[in-house]
Image (spheres, rainbow, N blue to C red):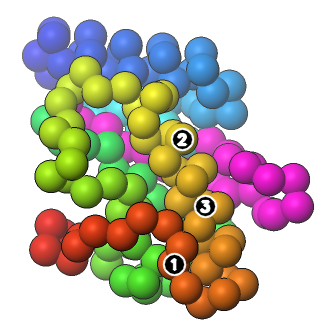
Amino acid sequence: MANSDYKILMLHKHHIEKTYDCFRCTINGRSQTLTCRGILHPLNYIEPYEIEIRVSCSFAPRVCIKNPKIPYNEDIHMFKNGNLCLYYPKDMLWNSSTSITEYTIPWINEWILYYELYKISGIWEGPAAPHRIIE
């Protein structure tokens, strides 16, 4: 792993764990990946969500919900591989210094809230943009 990549991943790790004490992060030097696992519980009356965030310096974070198991459904802004669709790439150019604590984790909380509404109404109430083409 390039020294600069390691420093970037360490910085992300530090900020995530400092800002969100519900997350624990590890860096895999071989795959040059930061993996963060944690529990998000945006509202007391819904079940907690076990989250995994994978970060590589070259790509936007990939986020999946480990528990509860959510089957793929393109209506709920999820990719076929189980990763969440959190933003429209043309609206935000991601780079290695983009803050996961300021963007990704709040977007995950927002996604969970929209998903909870979807379970009630069957309609995705959140913002929508084409996402099938970027899989």
Identified by mark 2, the residue type is Pro
Q: Residues within 10 Å of mark 2 (few under 14, many from 20)?
A: some
Residue name at image x 49 percent, y 17 percent: 15
Is residue 6 visible in the rendered image? The answer is yes
Identified by mark 1, the residue type is Trp
Q: Secondary structure at mark 1?
A: loop
Foreground residue, 44 or 88? 88
Magenta region, residue range? 38-57
Q: Position of residue 81 (x, y in %)?
A: 32, 72
Which mark, by number, is residue 112?
A: 3
Q: Secondary structure at mark 3?
A: helix
Q: Secondary structure at mark 2?
A: helix
The residue carrying mark 1 is 124
Tags 1 and 3 touching, CB below 8 Å:
no
Q: Quadrant of the N terminus?
A: top left
Q: Residues within 10 Å of mark 3 (few under 14, many from 20)?
A: many
Question: Is residue 103 depicted above or below 53 in this figure?
Answer: above
Q: Mark 1 against mark 2, which lies toward the viewer?
A: 1
Residue name at image x 52 percent, y 51 percent: 108
- Pointer 3 or 2: first along the chain: 2
Which residue in the rendered view is the most extreme toward the bottom?
Answer: 122
Foreground residue, 54 or 42? 42
Q: Position of residue 100 (x, y in %)?
A: 41, 31
Image check: 73 left or right of 97?
A: right
Question: Is residue 104 depicted above or below 63 in this figure?
Answer: above
The residue carrying mark 2 is 106
